[in-house]
Amino acid sequence: MEFIKDAFVRNRWLWFHILGGAVLTLIFLRLFLSPGTVQNPEHWAFLSLLAIALLWEISEFIWKGFIKKNLLETYGSYKRFYADAFGDIAGAVAASIVIILLF
């Protein structure tokens, strides 16, 4: 239960990741729907968004954990960071799925 609270309730930047997931999915859909691009544009838009969400969280872990060395200061524990990262990715993915279903 604590994991869910850290992932979704206490996550202050979750709204940003939801918005980013929706906007990026729309951009990817527009790009992939252009003539002569890929088949299954919804599939590629979703995978592109998922890749960016994962890379974002990995880069945040590297930046705050190894370069600035303030990950524990910011999140309090690795467990809380992992829950926050899971919530961010889940929010972006959920927004992407909603946009694809509505598109």
Image (cartoon, rainbow, N blue to C red):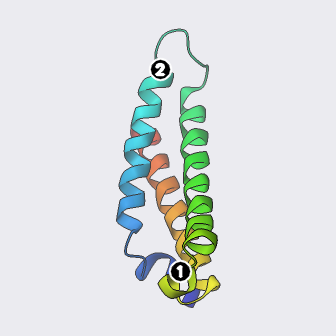
**Looking at the image, can residue 22 be seen?**
yes
Q: SS for tag 2?
A: loop
Image position, residue 58 (x, y; %): 62, 61
Real-space Cα separation, disc 1 to disc 2, in angstroms: 42 Å
Q: Kindly identify which residue carries mark 1.
A: 70
Q: Quadrant of the N terminus?
A: bottom right
- Given residues 7 and 55, the one toward you in this image is 55
Q: Choose top left, top right, bottom left or bottom right for residue 85.
A: bottom right
Q: Quadrant of the C terminus?
A: top left
Image position, residue 3 (x, y; %): 58, 84
Q: Kindly identify which residue carries mark 2.
A: 33
Q: Residues within 10 Å of mark 2 (few under 14, many from 20)?
A: some
Image position, residue 16 (x, y; %): 36, 60
Looking at the rendered structure, the kind of residue marked 1 is Asn
Looking at the rendered structure, the kind of residue marked 2 is Leu
- Given residues 47 and 54, the one toward you in this image is 54
**Looking at the image, can residue 1 be seen?**
no
Asked if the residue at tag 2 contacts the one at tag 1, i.e. Cβ–Cβ closer than 8 Å, the answer is no
The residue depicted at 61 percent of the width and 76 percent of the height is: 82
Q: SS for tag 1?
A: loop
Farthest residue, direction top: 36
Q: Would you say 31 lies left or right of 77 here?
A: left
12 relative to 32, above or below: below
The residue depicted at 56 percent of the width and 47 percent of the height is: 52
Q: Choose top left, top right, bottom left or bottom right for residue 12.
A: bottom left
Image position, residue 66 (x, y; %): 64, 71
The residue depicted at 40 percent of the width and 58 percent of the height is: 18
